[in-house]
Amino acid sequence: MRSLLLIGLLIVHSAYSQHPTSQMAVVEKMNEMRSLSAEIDEVANMNELVYREDLVQLLANQLAKNNGCPDRSIVMRDGYHIVISPQNDDELTALKLAAFTQSGSTVMASGKSICSLNGEEVVGYIIDASDIKPVRGNPGTRCPVGRTRNAIGLCALVGNGRRGYVRKDIDVNIPTNILDVDIEIPDISDILPW
């Protein structure tokens, strides 16, 4: 069964190479792989990943090392796993799988560069590291607070993802023609002391 996940990881790489400008395609494939992992390993609290554009700069800094030819690696920086490897590289696949299938991870970004020395494409992924332990059970049955099961069994954000006060729609028109009560405003000039 693990081989299916490894195949899924290769599909993520190929989706990225076919659609280099489509971050959504990468996130979609990554979430499909996470869903499969949750099903195989019976993880009830596997979160859905969302793309966060602000992580691209952190990834770009890592990709830029060594003239755009960084060594294949998985590094931890500022609470994120950064996975760097040549396009279609299978060498780090098992380690990539471990980084990509942490149940508590919620955000990711991806990018690529071309090595100036050999013209080889280098692909990078960044995903938040999580210390949340996987909970055993059917996928999506033990989602964290603020998340609910989506169609593929991952725990997706509810609403806009913000906690606390959310402003309600101010432009709501309240119909006044449905009131049967005559409203009478009392004269308060007799009550005021001045």
Image (cartoon, grey):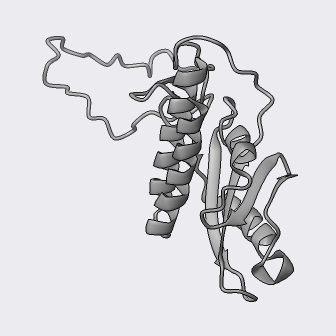
| Quadrant of the image occupied by residue 190 | top left
Q: Which sits in the foreground, 72 or 139?
A: 72
**Residue 20 % position (x, y):** 50, 69
Q: Is residue 92 left or right of residue 23?
A: right
In the displayed structure, 83 sits above or below 140; it is below
Closest to the observer, 113 or 50: 113
Residue that appears at 47% across and 32% down: 159
Q: Residue at x 75, y 71 (%)?
A: 63
Which quadrant: the C terminus?
top right
Q: Is residue 127 visible?
A: yes
- Quarter of the image where the N terminus is located: top right
Residue at 69% in and 30% down: 104
Q: Please say whether residue 19 is visible from this viewpoint.
A: no
Q: Position of residue 4 (x, y in %)?
A: 53, 37
Q: Is residue 148 left or right of residue 177?
A: right
Q: Position of residue 27 (x, y in %)?
A: 52, 50
Asked if 131 appears above or below 55 in the picture, the reply is above
Towards the viewer: 70 or 48: 70
- Is 19 left or right of 93, judged from the image as shown? left
Quadrant in the rendering for residue 86? bottom right
